[in-house]
């Protein structure tokens, strides 16, 4: 999973602070904001709301043991508190309103109702001209293609926003996370130093560019 680091509970996304280009062109003018709801009929991505705090708290609490291997915010020793989930939903709302980033709840349907199974999102970064995509899934929902579906929709939406590229950064040892960009046609750009990795492992960087438009 690729997670944006912010000492938050969710995602949205990774320790992506290491540049993979020495010099980057000016940040593009994006067509923002993206749509607040994306769906492929199986997985739905929708903007986080304050009312999602309890669901977010539950899935993080249940999944921290697995997430801790890859995400610094999950690896800390103290408990994840409900107030932190409340804070995340407030921060993501501010990011949407400022066009700094766009976090989505990953959801599916079960017994006629919605189930929150993870988080994903897109973020602007200063070290490269495109946007970053991050994602993670709760326990019990990995290995079912949900992350690939979510990131496919994020990538397509980023290109609809006129982003010149989408970048994914993940722990080098995270094979499940590696499979997502590989399946979606991202190009592996190599490895960069990962600050804060207790094992000293580097991060792997993937980038995808929009298909050239035919005349």
Image (tube, rainbow, N blue to C red):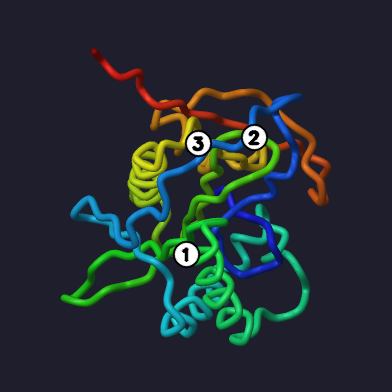
Residue 102 or 7: which is nearer the viewer?
Answer: 102
The local crowd at label 2, few if under 14, some if 14 to 19, many if 20 or more residues have their Cα within 10 Å, is: many
Mark 3 against mark 2, which lies toward the viewer? 2
In the rendered view of the protein, which quadrant contains the C terminus? top left
Q: Which mark is residue 166?
A: 3
* The quadrant where residue 69 appears: bottom right
User: Residue at image x 71%, y 66%?
Assistant: 7
- Residue 26 drawn at (x, y percent): 63, 33
Q: Nearer the viewer, residue 167 or 82?
A: 167
Tell me what residue is drawn at x 23 percent, y 68 percent: 109
Q: Residue furthest top?
A: 215
Q: Position of residue 177 (x, y in %)?
A: 53, 42
Separation of disc 2 and disc 1 at Cα?
29 Å
What residue is disc 1 on?
A: 138
Check disc 2 and report the residue beneath it.
128
Mark 1 lies on a secondary structure that is loop
Residue 195: x and y in percent read 81, 46
Q: Is residue 187 left or right of residue 148?
A: right
Q: Is residue 95 above or below residue 85?
A: above
Q: Quick check: 70 left or right of 35?
A: right
Query: Looking at this view, is 73 or 36 the one in front?
Result: 36
> Considering only order in the chain, which callout, 1 or 2, is on the residue closer to the N terminus?
2
Mark 2 or mark 3, which is nearer the start of the sequence?
2
In terms of depth relative to the viewer, which is nearer, 211 or 83? Answer: 211
**Residue located at (37% from left, 50% from top):** 150
């Amino acid at each position: 999973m690729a997670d944006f680091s912010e000492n938050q509970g969710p995602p949205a996304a990774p320790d992506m602070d290491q540049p993979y280009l020495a010099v980057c062109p000016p940040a593009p003018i994006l067509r923002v904001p993206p749509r607040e709801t994306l769906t492929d009929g199986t997985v739905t991505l929708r903007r986080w709301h304050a009312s999602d705090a309890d669901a977010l708290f539950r899935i993080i609490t249940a999944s921290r043991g697995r997430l801790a291997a890859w995400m610094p915010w999950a690896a800390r020793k103290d408990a994840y508190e409900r107030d932190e989930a409340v804070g995340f939903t407030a921060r993501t709302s501010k990011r949407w309103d400022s066009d700094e980033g766009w976090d989505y709840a990953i959801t599916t349907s079960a017994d006629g109702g919605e189930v929150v199974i993870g988080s994903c999102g897109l973020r602007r970064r200063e070290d490269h001209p495109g946007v970053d995509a991050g994602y993670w899934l709760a326990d019990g929902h990995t290995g079912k293609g949900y992350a690939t579906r979510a990131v496919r929709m994020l990538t397509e939406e980023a290109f609809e926003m006129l982003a010149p590229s989408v970048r994914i950064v993940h722990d080098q040892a995270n094979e499940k996370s590696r499979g997502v960009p590989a399946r979606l046609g991202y190009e592996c750009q190599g490895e960069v130093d990962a600050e804060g990795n207790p094992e000293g492992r580097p991060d792997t960087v993937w980038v995808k560019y929009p298909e050239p438009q035919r005349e």
